Image: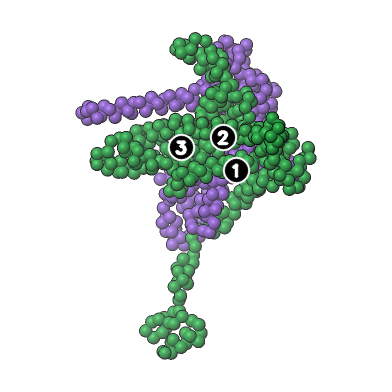
């Protein structure tokens, strides 16, 4: 242990100050969510604010019951299906894009900014533009194509940046060695590239899944007759707010956290294996 | 003139080099081509085609249609092709804008004022986000030395980004209100004597909720740019006798500017397009340009929704360009 000098003590104090700040920040970011968790167990006669009037699973039961907040079970199913589809497409497209960007090609700068534009354009603009365009052409929007389309526009830049970072650290000599030994491009990809970049693809997929699962603004005008889960949540919010929505919010948040945890576990396993 | 030179002149071939003129004729660029003839990897066009097509259909067509539709004519239940600036006039000027006798003389329209309110909230929230995010990113990148801890603490702060933002907005309800947690807390510590209604459906609570929703977006880029700083620079400055504050001002802060710019652009565009939080936390008391767009879409006045959307897009582009003018982010990308 080093001697306690004034300099060292001063540094320690600064560090402690920053740690306290970090803790306060976490309270600020997570605090409302914990209030929501707690209030979802509100007694049957309680409202959406404290104090708690008893402790019950009344609102949870109500959530599970029929016609609580729209048709939750089917909108949850749609959201999951959409999120999984977006995840797969994001993983594939961002991997292909990042592989293209390993080489110099004409228009690479423009394409880069085009991909990044997906990050910059607010969902409400995309929603409006595509919805009015489809209306004019005469195709009614539905979550599984127009919704899917704009979701991927939103998730692609995240996946792309992840895959770019992966290929930045990629040792291309491994592929060259395989080529020199006579492997064709598919074999090189399957045997060398893919196993090494799988953790990255999982991370890109995580962005695809979670961002799509929670996406609201981009789906507002584009989901057609059937709602996704965030749209149902929004509908419930604009009606009379009951603790049911806290139960729903809690369930949805726990699900999101579980998914993140699952992705991190898969990532860690694959990452260890690829070393 | 040698035979070889004459021959090359007649055939338009470059003169052959080599002792007896028998070396194979290879122009330098052809040599390069031959050496790298086998372009390794899959062909670029194949790799980029699907994503490019996707972006054209689902990103560029919608944006271009907003621009085109903003000149069309509204029929009350739809729109027809036209080239009219009526909707733009409606966006900027109220009835009697140019009439000095009218009470509305030179009064900007409610739509312009809404855009201005949206912008004002955006700037306020951006500034607060920066003030909150920077020390956090600094702490994570400079004070936490163990890489594993750094990653864990960073992820912990970033997790809310992957949860539903609508639900995080709803979660504000128990905090606000006369009997909300904030009022109760202030009563408990004796800061106030009776609950203040200040904390529900007020500008204050709206701003606070927006900060909480978007601050994590600023943390990430700032953290990455701070983490990339070469520690030897700091060491060198320390050896030359720089105080911690000087090190921060001369080295750390300038090098973190690209991260700040990216984070701020991110927060800026998200906030400008914001519309759901206003309804939940602000009770729909104010509208953002986002809500105006959706309202006009709902009453089937698509061209006017498009005008609002286009003006929003323009305001955002100006904002992004201003940020990029202030900071050169190309080094970061």
The residue shown at (48%, 38%) is B263
Q: Nearer the viewer, residue A245 or A196?
A: A245
The residue shown at (45%, 44%) is B327
Establish if B254 lies above or below A20: below
Judging from the image, mark 1 belongs to the subunit labelled: B
Q: CA distance from mark 1 to mark 3?
A: 26 Å
Establish if B207 lies above or below A41: below
Quick one: label 2 or label 3, which is nearer the N terminus?
A: 2
Q: Nearer the viewer, residue A86 or B170?
A: B170
Q: Secondary structure at mark 3?
A: helix
Residue B196 percent coordinates (x, y): 54, 14
Residue where numbered disc 2 is placed: B119
Chain coloured green here:
B
Left or right: B227, with A111 as reference point? left
Residue where numbered disc 1 is placed: B314
Q: Nearer the viewer, residue B123 or B8?
A: B123
Q: From the image, which quarter does the N terminus of chain A lie in? A: top left
Q: CA distance from mark 2 to mark 3?
A: 23 Å
Q: Secondary structure at mark 1?
A: helix
């Amino acid at each position: 242990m080093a001697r306690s000098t004034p300099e060292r003590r001063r540094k320690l104090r600064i560090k402690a100050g920053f740690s306290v700040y970090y803790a306060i920040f976490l309270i600020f970011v997570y605090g409302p969510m914990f209030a929501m968790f707690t209030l979802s167990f509100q007694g049957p006669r309680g409202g959406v604010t404290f104090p708690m009037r008893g402790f019950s699973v009344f609102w949870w039961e109500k959530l599970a019951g029929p016609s609580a907040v729209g048709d939750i079970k089917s909108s949850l199913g749609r959201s999951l299906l959409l999120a999984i589809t977006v995840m797969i497409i994001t993983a594939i497209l961002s991997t292909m894009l990042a592989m293209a960007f390993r080489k110099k090609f004409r228009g690479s700068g423009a394409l880069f900014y085009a991909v990044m534009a997906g990050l910059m354009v607010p969902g409400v603009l995309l929603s409006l533009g595509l919805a009015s365009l489809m209306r004019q052409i005469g195709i009614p929007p539905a979550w599984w194509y127009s919704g899917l389309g704009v979701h991927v526009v939103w998730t692609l830049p995240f996946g792309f940046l992840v895959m770019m970072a992966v290929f930045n650290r990629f040792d291309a000599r491994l592929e060259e060695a395989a080529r020199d030994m006579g492997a064709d491009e598919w074999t090189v990809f399957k045997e060398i590239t893919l196993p090494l970049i799988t953790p990255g693809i999982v991370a890109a997929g995580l962005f695809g899944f979670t961002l799509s699962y929670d996406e609201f603004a981009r789906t507002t005008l584009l989901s057609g007759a059937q709602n996704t889960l965030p749209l149902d949540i929004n509908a419930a919010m604009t009606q009379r707010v009951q603790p049911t929505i806290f139960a729903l919010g809690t369930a949805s948040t726990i699900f999101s956290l579980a998914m993140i945890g699952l992705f991190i576990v898969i990532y860690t396993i694959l990452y260890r294996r690829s070393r | 003139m040698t035979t070889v030179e004459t021959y090359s002149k007649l055939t338009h071939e470059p003169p052959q080099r080599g002792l007896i003129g028998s070396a194979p004729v290879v122009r330098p660029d052809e040599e390069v081509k031959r050496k790298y003839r086998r372009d390794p990897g899959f062909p670029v066009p194949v790799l980029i085609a699907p994503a490019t097509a996707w972006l054209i259909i689902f990103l560029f067509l919608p944006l271009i249609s907003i621009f085109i539709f903003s000149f069309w004519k509204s029929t009350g239940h739809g729109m027809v092709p036209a080239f009219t600036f009526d909707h733009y006039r409606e966006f900027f000027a109220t009835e009697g804008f140019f009439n000095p006798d009218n009470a509305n003389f030179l009064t900007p329209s409610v739509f312009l004022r809404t855009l201005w309110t949206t912008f004002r909230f955006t700037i306020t929230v951006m500034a607060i986000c920066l003030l909150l995010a920077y020390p956090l990113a600094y702490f994570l990148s400079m004070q936490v030395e163990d890489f594993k801890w750094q990653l864990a603490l960073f992820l912990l702060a970033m997790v809310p980004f992957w949860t539903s933002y609508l639900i995080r907005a709803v979660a504000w309800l128990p905090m606000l209100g006369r009997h909300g947690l904030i009022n109760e807390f202030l009563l408990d510590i004796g800061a106030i004597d009776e609950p203040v209604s200040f904390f529900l459906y007020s500008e204050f609570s709206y701003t606070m909720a927006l900060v909480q929703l978007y601050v994590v977006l600023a943390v990430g880029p700032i953290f990455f740019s701070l983490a990339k700083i070469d520690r030897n620079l700091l060491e060198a400055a320390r050896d030359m006798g720089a105080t911690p504050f000087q090190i921060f001002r001369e080295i750390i802060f300038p090098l973190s500017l690209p991260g700040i710019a990216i984070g701020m652009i991110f927060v800026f565009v998200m906030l400008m397009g914001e519309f759901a939080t206003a309804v939940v936390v602000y009770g729909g008391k104010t509208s953002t340009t986002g809500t105006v767009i959706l309202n006009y879409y709902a009453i089937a006045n698509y061209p006017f929704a498009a005008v609002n959307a286009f003006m929003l897009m323009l305001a955002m582009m100006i904002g992004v360009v201003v940020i990029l003018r202030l900071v050169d982010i190309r080094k970061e990308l």
